[in-house]
Image (spheres, rainbow, N blue to C red):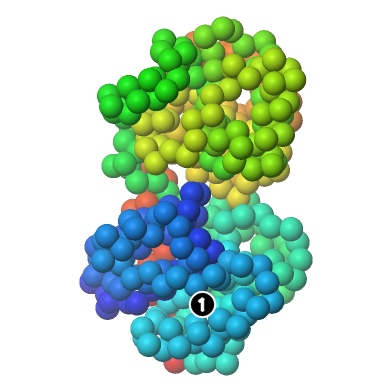
Amino acid sequence: MQGSASLTVLQILPALNMGGVERGTVEFALYLKEHGHRPVVISGGGYQVKTIEAAGIEHIQLPVGKKSPLTFRYVPTLRKIFKKYKVDIVHARSRLPAWLVYFALRKKPRPPYFITTLHGLHSVSRYSSVMARGDAVIAVSDTAADYLQRHFADYLSSPPQVIYRGVDLEQFNYGHTTDCDWKTDIETRFPMLRNSQKLLLPGRLTAVKGFEHIMPWLQQSQDNQYLLVTAEPNQSDYCQRINTELKQKALSDKVIWIGRQDSMADLYAYADLTLSVNRQPESFGRTVLESLTVGTPVVGYDHGGVGEILAALFPTGRVPVADRQALVERINTMLHNPPAVKQQNQFSNQQQFEQTMDVYQQLMEQPQ
């Protein structure tokens, strides 16, 4: 799309807080701005709003992720926004915002064109079918594309286009060295981490994360081995349950609750090993890719998008799904004899964004 006309691209999602979808939305908005397009983001707000506004990107705050029938009252508001901003592309990455866009554009001529990206393997229902109803549908992996074709083929206007998610190769640079101030700060907060071996379970800590699968390793781990989680023990009911179980099993001192982290490249570089033990397959698995891009090995269950990434970049990290004994053995093997991780450049933001812009351009070039 080099040299093509400037587009107004509106991305819509529930909120701009922690998460891969949210960070990806911000990164793509910055890319659009840098390449002469006009990005606009609609969300319910969040701590990343300041990032895009500081870059001169327009953010419109609407509660488009609030699961209530009343949320559909914003459909006319969206129509007005699309007209006011002369939007060319509306890109939805979540089901409720996608339904709002679907109804807002239902009777309108194109543009704006309606794009969906399937980021998650949702429960199969009519509610989830909206992710297949775009003028173009993007899947973030072969796993995601297969899900769409198996369950929602009747709604697809054309086969989903697989565009793997990427990472910023400058931010997550191979061989990244943890910032000295960052390291000093975390080791001041948690002195036991000095000269220790650290496993990392990054991302939101929810029931699907499979934390219980790590318990057998924790029970046999050595004194100087710890698990880092990017959450707080009182952050949610699930976190509280996990914390209570750790206390009951006398494992509280093995898990370090470091809270939300913005400097993820520093955290991956600081860890000896990153884990992905989701109970259910993920559509992609961004944390696995980020860790490997930095050069930190990953042990993960061999299913979904995580299995695809590991097969492509680090096959030795794959473990049969839910095989806790194999998980323990693989972790211990890698901690005892750390494997080298090869530098990767096949999953980059640049490639992902260029492919996404190609999808936009194909739609814009259609006869009206």
In this rendering, the answer to whether 350 lies above or below 114 is above
Give residue 85's position: percent from left, percent from top: 36, 83
Q: Is there any visible trace of residue 25 in the rendered image?
A: yes
* Residue ID for mark 1: 114
- The residue depicted at 75 percent of the width and 71 percent of the height is 126
Q: Nearer the viewer, residue 209 or 361?
A: 209
Task: Label 1: state its secondary structure.
Answer: strand
The number of callouts visible is: 1
- The residue depicted at 71 percent of the width and 69 percent of the height is 127
28 sits to left or right of 212: left
Q: Nearer the viewer, residue 204 or 44?
A: 44
- The residue depicted at 60 percent of the width and 33 percent of the height is 233
Q: Nearer the viewer, residue 227 or 162?
A: 227
For badge 1, the amino acid type reads: Phe
**Which quarter of the image is occupied by the N terminus?**
bottom left
Give residue 225's position: percent from left, percent from top: 54, 13
The residue lying furthest to the front in this view is: 234
Give residue 11's position: percent from left, percent from top: 44, 69
Q: Is there any visible trace of residue 308 in the rendered image?
A: no
Quarter of the image holding residue 214?
top right
Q: Nearer the viewer, residue 135 or 324?
A: 324
In this rendering, the answer to whether 26 lies above or below 232 is below
**Which quarter of the image is occupied by the C terminus?**
bottom left
In this rendering, the answer to whether 209 lies above or below 110 is above
